[in-house]
Amino acid sequence: MATIREVTYEILRQHGLTTFFGNPGSNELTFLDEMPADFRYILGLHEGAVLAMADGFAQASGGPAFANLHSAAGTGHAVGALTNSWYSHSPLVITAGQQVRSQVGTEATLSNVDAPSLPQPLVKWSGEPLAASDAPRMISQAIHTATTTPAGPVYVSIPLDDWRQEVDDGLVAELPARRVETAGALSPAQIEELAAVLDQAQHPVLVLGPDVDATASNDQAVALAEKLRAPAWIAPSASRCPFPTRHPAFRGVLPASITGISAQLAGHDVILVVGAPVFRYHQFDPGPYLPDDASLVHLTSDPAEAARAPMGRSVVVDVQQALAALVDAITQAERPMPEPRSSLSPPADHDATTPFAPEAVFSAVAATAPADAIYVKEATSTTGVVWDHLDISRPGSYYFPAAGGLGFGLAAAVGVQLAQPERPVIALIGDGSANYGITALWTAAQYHLPVTFVILNNGTYAALRSFSNYMHVTDAPGIDIPGIDFVRIAEGYGVSARAVKTSDELQDALRRSLGSDEPHLIEVPTRPIEALP
């Protein structure tokens, strides 16, 4: 008879889960022992970085990713990163090692007491098998739960003495071959009704979210905008880029406030939101949720997003199918296409005595990066300006922490590069954010991943400083973080690094890094942006 461990590896193999992200402890050793040759283990030095790597890998590969955490402590380390995975609908299968069954009740060291409750509410489902023999079925359940629409992270705690137990032959035959599919399509009546709403609109507008990019529906979104002759915004707090930033219909990213969104959408009578919540607000600016005389239609794959929206009509549906159906059903509008928004001129070069404006960094990156570059960004205070400078036109080319939980960017870039080895990955990371995931530099070096890490070092938590000004907080401690030398830190982890002070130096460093097959870090002194992100 096969062991539980052997059956589990076969289940994982059948679902393509052959890359593990982890940081092992004693509870996980019996599972990892004699790992099959067709599996690979990506070691991270902190579970927060481990989970962010797995998150980046899942989003960039378009499939599930497998993370292995160490009991309760390792799970706790990863929970901050898990907030981003939850809101980005990342299909993560997260396992954690548990003490041997007979010692959990006495709370022996490394027991994960009440393990299923630990990651809640940031997972779709969590569990721990009541009997060792149920562990393979529970792993199968976890995979299908993580990958069915809406995708999301799941969590399974497995006692370390389960893995060597034998399992029933019937499960060996049935579990690996199981498939679960989702088929949620607009009905013909719904298509006709929604098409009529859009055809009758005088001033429609699109608001597009991360699930458009996650389902590679960007071309359908462009086709819909062009057929409607409507402007297209990206939903607030965008974790992906669902619309090409150089298309004439592109308007940027909506602000994350009630009155800010209403002001930007004023004058539109029909607001079509696709693949995003309605809406992810941040700063508190109360007021009307919608402009006067505007109606909102919301297409989402997530029933929870539909249920909690404060306004409009929501339809839970397959986003890609819905966009394609509406493109076919609506009538070509006769109004003119929206005028392209005025682009910002790149800031002038500066000498070595002046910190860079963040816009100058993004302009230099845009001028140097190849067309197929992937950007992983976690310089949170610059979110409002990055869209004016980066040319993002391909699906799967931009990733940002979906919940704003710091520590995503630097580590996620490692996972993205593992998932997309043929495309260059450029990580644009703030100095505050970098410290939350800095150990991922070691992983990049050890696995020879040619990520270009650009650290925008302004010596402060600039987003927090902006919120302090907005909230009239004049003397809060802990906002400034001077004196960090990222070049020396990177070199200590085995990553080649360089500090630059001029635009010429920055572009030279970018060209050298992008032409290399090893990771590089570029530290750029920048000045803070005072406006809210």
Image: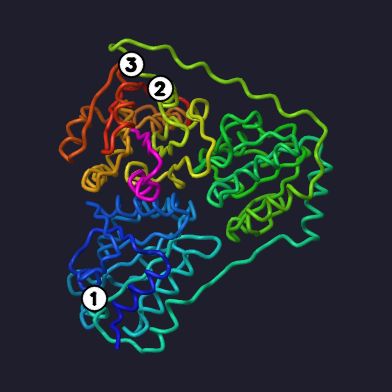
| Image position, residue 521 (x, y; %) | 27, 33
Describe residue 444's horizontal placement relative to residue 468 as left or right. Answer: left
Q: Quadrant of the N terminus?
A: bottom left
Describe residue 162's horizontal placement relative to residue 227 as left or right. Answer: left
Please say if the residues under marks 3 and 2 sit with CB atoms less than 8 Å apart.
no
Which residue sits at x=45%, y=47%? 403
Please tell me in which quadrant of the rendered image residue 93 appears. Answer: bottom left
Which numbered circle lies on residue 364? Answer: 2
Q: Which one is nearer the viewer's eye here, 294 or 179?
A: 179
Q: Is residue 422 magenta?
A: yes
Residue 477 at least partly seen = no
| Image position, residue 498 (x, y; %) | 23, 26
Q: Amino acid at mark 2?
A: Ala
Label 1: how many Cα within 10 Å (few below 14, some 14–19, many 20+)? many
Q: Earlier in the sequence, mark 3 or mark 2?
A: 2
**Viewer-nearest of discs 2 and 1:** 2
Q: Secondary structure at mark 2?
A: helix
Q: Amino acid at mark 1?
A: Leu
**Viewer-nearest of discs 1 and 3:** 3
Q: Which residues are magenta?
A: 412-430
Which residue sits at x=42%, y=84%? 173
Tell me: residue 385, above or below residue 216. above
Q: Earlier in the sequence, mark 1 or mark 3?
A: 1
Q: Secondary structure at mark 1?
A: loop
Q: How many marks?
A: 3
Separation of residues labelled 3 and 2 (CA atoms): 9 Å
Q: Amino acid at mark 3?
A: Asp
| Image position, residue 444 (x, y; %) | 26, 44
Residue marked by disc 3: 504
